[in-house]
Image (cartoon, rainbow, N blue to C red):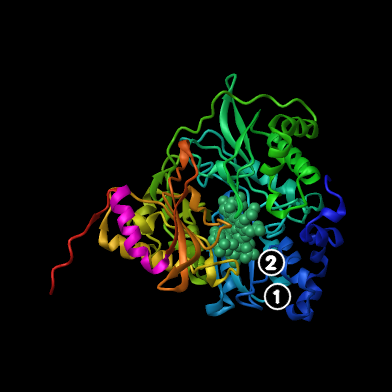
Amino acid sequence: MVETNSKLNKFEKFKAEKDGLAVKAELEHFAQVGWESLEETDLTHRLKWLGIFFRPVTPGRFMVRLRLPSGVLSSQKMRVLGEVIQRYGDEGSADITTRQNIQLRGLRLEDIPDIFLRFEAVGLTSVQSGMDNVRNITASPVAGIDASELIDTRGLVRLVQDMITANGAGNPEFTNLPRKFNIAIEGGRDNSVHAEINDVAFVPAYREGHLGLNVLVGGFFSARRCAAAIPLDAWVPPDQAVVQLCRAILEVYRDHGLRANRQQARLMWLIDEWGLEPFRAAVEAAYGQPLLRAAAKDEVDWNKREHLGIYPQKQPGLNFVGLHVPVGRLTASAMLDLARLADVYGEGELRLTVEQNLIIPHVPDSRLAALLQEPLLQRFTLDPKPLVRSLVSCTGAQFCNFALVETKQRALALARSLDDRLTLPQPVRIHWTGCPNSCGQPQVADIGLMGTKARKQGRMVEGVDIYMGGKVGKEAQLGTCVQKSIPCDDLPEVLENLLITHFGAIPKAPAAPG
Ligand code: SRM
Ligand code: SF4
C-alpha cells in the first residue's frame, strides 16, 4: 500500500480496525440484540459487506442488494425474493437496478439470518455487493439466446463472481479495495452493458482470426469526476484468462490503489498517477505472463438495443419477451406473478436489463398469444410510449439519504404527462439521478437529470442539473451538463421545449371538448 497509516481516510481506518466481512460471523447476534444496539460503523457501513443497507430514511427497515451475475435468475429465485418482501406488506418492495440486479426493501434485521438461509438454499447471495467491493457483474441480458451474439459470456461472468466472492461465501482477498469496483463483460455487438462506465470492461474482438475480448479500464462516475474507460491495450481469449485478468487487475488496485482521499480512489486515479503503460506492466506482472496487445478494432458495431417486445431467439421456435417495468419498481405480487409466467410460458428463467426492465426468455411460438393475454402485461407492457419506454431512475429521496430530490415517482409522472402531450418520432432516453453520485447514469442519457437544490422566488426548492449528449452502443460517449439548477416545478415546460427543439417532438392537438 502506498500511503502511511496517518494518511488514510476514515473509511480506511475503520476497515483496518475490522474487516467488513467480519460481521458475517456476528449477524445472528446482531439480529438478536436489534439494530438499535449495534455499533455505528457496523450498522451503517460494515453490514453493506453482506449486502445489508441500513436506510436512515426508514430506520429499522433495511435494504438488501443481491448479486445476480449477468442479470439472470431462475423463477425459483424470483419467487424466494418475492416471498421475502411479501411478509412486510406495504413496506416490502423491490427495485431492478442499473446494474441488472435486484434490491429488496423493508426488511427487518431480526429476519435476515433466516432470509439468508433461504437465499443459500436456492443459490442466491448478497455478499460483497456494497461499499469497497466489486458490484454485480453485468453482461448482455440476452447472452446465450441472441442469434447475433459473438460470445456467450454467462459462464465467464459466473466464474469471475465466484472468484471474487469465493463462491458466494465471501472472500477476504477482495473485501478491502480502496473503493467500489465495476466489471462488465459484453459478448454482443451492441454494448448493452455501457462498457465505457465500468472500472474494467471486456468487449468482443477478433485478434489474428481468433475471437476474444479487448479490455477497457478506468471508467467511472462520481460526484467529483466522471471518466470514460480507456483501452488497456490488451486482448484475452474468452476463457479462464478473463478470470485471471480480473484477478490481476483487482490485486493491483487493492495493493496500490490510492487510499488517502476517498474522492480520488477509483481505479482511473491510479492509472492517471502511474500512467497507462506502467499500470499495464503491473497488471501483467500480477497476471504472471505477457499480455497480448489489443485487437486493432472491437466488434461493437451496433446501436444499443432496448429489448422490449418479442424477438426470436437463436434457438429455433423460441422467443424472448421484454417487459417494461416502470422505473424498475416491483411489488411482491408482481414478482410472484413473474415467476409464474416464466414457469408457465418459458423455461423458468428471467433476465434483467441495465434499463431496469425484465425479459422472459424461451417462450415457444405457440405460447406467445396466451402470454400476451396475461393481466400483468397490462402493467408491464411490451410497447410503452416513447418517453416512459426509455426512462431510468435511481432510488432517490424515498429511500436514499444522499438524495437531493425525489426521483422515481416524479420521473414517471413527468414522462407520462409529456408522452400524453407530445408526439415523438423516436424514444428519448431520459435518466434521473437524485444526486451527483450518478447511480441513474444521467451522463449516458439523451437527457440526464441530476438532483440538486435550486432557487425559485427566493426560496430553495428541489431542482436538477440537465445533461445532454450521452450516446450509447457503438458510439458511446458521455453527456455533459448543459443547464444548472432548474427548479423541478419548471421541468414540464423546460423538458417540453428541449424535446421539441432537439428531438423532433410535436405538441398534440388538445382533445376536443365533450
Ligand atoms: Fe449507486 C452509492 C444506489 C448504481 C455510483 N448507490 C449508492 C448507495 C448505496 C448510497 C446509499 O448508501 O444510500 C445507493 C443506495 C440507495 C438505495 O437505497 O437504493 C445507491 N447505485 C444505486 C442503485 C440501486 C441505483 C438504481 O436505482 O438502480 C444501483 C445499484 C447497482 C447494483 O445493483 O449494484 C446503483 N451507483 C450505480 C452506478 C451505475 C452503474 O454502476 O452503472 C453508479 C455510477 C457508476 C460508477 O460507480 O462508477 C453509482 N453509488 C454511486 C456512488 C459514487 C461512486 C464514487 O466513486 O464516488 C455512490 C457513493 C459512494 O460510493 O460513495 C453510490
Ligand atoms: Fe442515492 Fe444519489 Fe445514488 Fe440516487 S444517485 S441512489 S440519490 S446515491
Q: Amino acid at mark 1?
A: Leu
User: Quick one: 243 or 6, which is closer to the camera?
Assistant: 6
User: Quick one: 50 or 294, which is closer to the camera?
Assistant: 294
Q: Which mark is residue 109?
A: 1
Residue 309: x and y in percent read 38, 51
87 sits to left or right of 422: right
Which quadrant contains ligand 1? Answer: bottom right
Q: Quadrant of the N terminus?
A: top right
Q: Quadrant of residue 448?
A: bottom left
Q: Residue at x 45, y 69 (%)?
A: 455
Q: Residue at x 35, y 50 (%)?
A: 427
Q: Quadrant of the C terminus?
A: bottom left
Real-space Cα separation, disc 1 to disc 2, in angstroms: 9 Å
Q: Which mark is residue 450?
A: none
Q: Residue at x 77, y 56 (%)?
A: 169
Q: Which mark is residue 52?
A: 2
- For numbered disc 2, what is the local secondary structure? strand
Q: Can see residue 428?
A: yes
92 sits to left or right of 420: right
Question: Does the closest atom of ligand 1 sit within 8 Å of the Cβ of label 1?
Answer: no
Residue 500 in magenta stretch: yes
Residue 244: x and y in percent read 74, 37
Where 428 falls versus 456 (above or below)? Answer: above
Where 341 falls versus 285 (above or below)? Answer: below
Whether the residues at callouts 1 and 2 have beta carbons within 8 Å, the answer is yes
Instruction: Specify start and end residues of the magenta stretch as a single range.
Output: 487-503
Q: Amino acid at mark 2?
A: Ile
- For numbered disc 1, what is the local secondary structure? helix
Q: Can see residue 78?
A: no
Judge the density around disc 1: few (<14), some (14-19), many (≥20) Cα neighbours within 10 Å.
many
